[in-house]
């Protein structure tokens, strides 16, 4: 194992060993190499004649561009629009998305979450999530109606076992008892369970009520407290499309954060549908967990592993 990966793992282990155990073998091996970024910073300081650290063309010290391209990009400099962005995403974008998340999810108040890591849309975020957290044979709990791509990603690509429960009860609300039964049955058989929550839901369009959201988070928190490792991942592709009075108007991620050290909450979201920019391909991965002390180190380690996979 690379010494940097070892260092990140011991940092995670010190604050919350459960999280280290939840990582897939790839996740454990991942790290963010010292490379172009640190070399680039060094070159800025010391390389006055030639800076050969990164493969972009420059002109008079600025990013070179074709006028025909820049003619259609207004208000964003060539440096910001054409140069390579860091593997983590542009720092200002990550900060802005985190701030908007805190604003839109009041239950995150006082809770500590990671900085979002930028992906190429949510489909990409799902694959990166699976790289870090899904082993072949792992169970992923989903309802009986799902976005078809979950099968392609989790079952076909990563060899996970999808275990499904009825989505609706007879009186049409979320089938809490089928969900709870499935979660508890899988928790009895497995040291780790992964639960994917997608509200508003594709294909039904259903979004849970405040009461249902609170109960879902309660069930997952309870299973974690009883000793199972729970990876609870929210696919918030349709965040904001909330129409009923009783609908939970924030992400279930906000209710899952800081529940128990054995429960890791992960939010996958993006500008795609939330900001009506389907072709921009901008998504995010954000972590929320409970640690012994300050979680900043754990978040930085998880962000580095995630960005390492994005390289
Ligand atoms: C539930 C769900 N998640 C994710 C996506 C994909 O999002 P993106 O276009 O950002 O990859 C979709 C798109 O249809 C979806 O329905």
Image (spheres, rainbow, N blue to C red):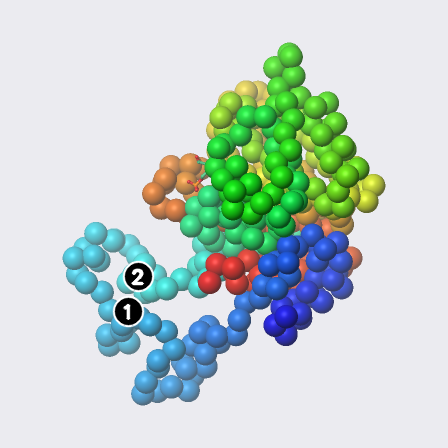
Asked if the residue under mark 1 is in contact with the one under mark 2, i.e. CB atoms within 8 Å, the reply is yes
Question: Which residue is farthest top?
Answer: 171
Left or right? Give the position of 67 relative to 168. left
Q: Quadrant of the N terminus?
A: bottom right
Q: CA distance from mark 2 to mark 1?
A: 7 Å
Depth check, front residue: 255 or 227: 227
Q: Residues within 10 Å of mark 1 (few under 14, many from 20)?
A: some
Q: Quadrant of ligand 1?
A: top left
Marked residue nearer the N-terminal end (2 or 1): 1
Is disc 1 placed on a helix, strand or loop?
A: strand
Q: Is residue 216 above or below residue 305?
A: above
> Relative to the observer, which residue lies in front, 173 or 114?
173
Instruction: Tell me: is circle 2 under 8 Å from ligand 1.
Output: no
Q: Residue at x 50, y 29 (%)?
A: 202
The residue where tag 2 is placed is: 82
Which residue occupies the foreground of this view, 249 or 194?
A: 194
Whether residue 72 appears in this view of the structure is yes
In screen coordinates, is 136 left or right of 218?
A: left
Q: Where residue 88 is drawn, which disc sits there?
A: none
Residue 79 in the image, given as x and y percentages of width and height: 32, 65
Rendered position, 256 above or below 78: above
Q: What residue is rendered at 38% in x and 86% in y?
A: 47
| Residue in the picture at 70% in, 42% down | 193
The residue carrying mark 1 is: 63
Q: Is residue 272 left or right of residue 141?
A: left
Task: Describe the element under mark 2 as helix, strand or loop.
Answer: helix
Q: Residue at x 64, y 61 (%)?
A: 28
Q: In which quarter of the view is residue 304 placed?
A: bottom right
Q: Residue furthest left?
A: 68
Residue 150 image point, x, y percent: 52, 37
């Amino acid at each position: 194992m690379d010494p940097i990966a070892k260092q990140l793992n011991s940092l995670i282990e010190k604050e919350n060993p459960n999280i280290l155990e939840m990582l897939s073998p790839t996740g454990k091996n991942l790290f963010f190499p010292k490379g172009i970024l640190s070399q680039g910073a060094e070159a800025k300081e010391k390389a006055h004649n030639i800076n050969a650290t990164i493969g972009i063309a420059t002109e008079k010290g600025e990013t070179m561009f074709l006028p025909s391209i820049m003619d259609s990009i207004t208000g964003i400099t060539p440096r910001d629009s054409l140069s390579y962005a860091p593997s983590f995403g542009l720092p200002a974008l990550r900060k802005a998305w985190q701030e908007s998340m805190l604003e839109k999810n009041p239950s995150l108040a006082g809770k500590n979450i990671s900085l979002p890591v930028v992906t190429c849309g949510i489909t990409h975020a799902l694959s990166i999530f699976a790289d870090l957290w899904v082993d072949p044979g792992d169970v992923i709990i989903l309802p009986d109606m799902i976005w078809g791509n979950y099968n392609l990603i989790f079952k076909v690509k990563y060899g996970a076992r999808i275990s499904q429960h009825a989505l609706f009860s007879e009186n049409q609300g979320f089938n809490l008892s089928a969900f709870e039964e499935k979660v508890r049955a899988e928790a009895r058989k497995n040291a780790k369970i992964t639960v994917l929550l997608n509200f508003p839901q594709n294909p039904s369009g259903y979004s849970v009520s405040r009461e249902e959201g609170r109960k879902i988070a309660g069930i997952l928190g309870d299973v974690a407290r009883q000793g199972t490792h729970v990876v609870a991942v929210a696919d918030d592709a349709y965040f904001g499309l909330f129409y009923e009075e009783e609908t939970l108007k924030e992400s279930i991620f906000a209710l899952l954060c800081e529940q128990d050290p054995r429960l890791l909450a992960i939010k996958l979201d993006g500008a795609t549908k939330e900001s009506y920019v389907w072709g921009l391909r901008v998504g995010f991965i954000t972590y929320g967990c409970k640690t012994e002390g300050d979680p900043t180190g754990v978040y930085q380690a998880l962000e580095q592993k995630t960005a390492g996979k994005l390289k």
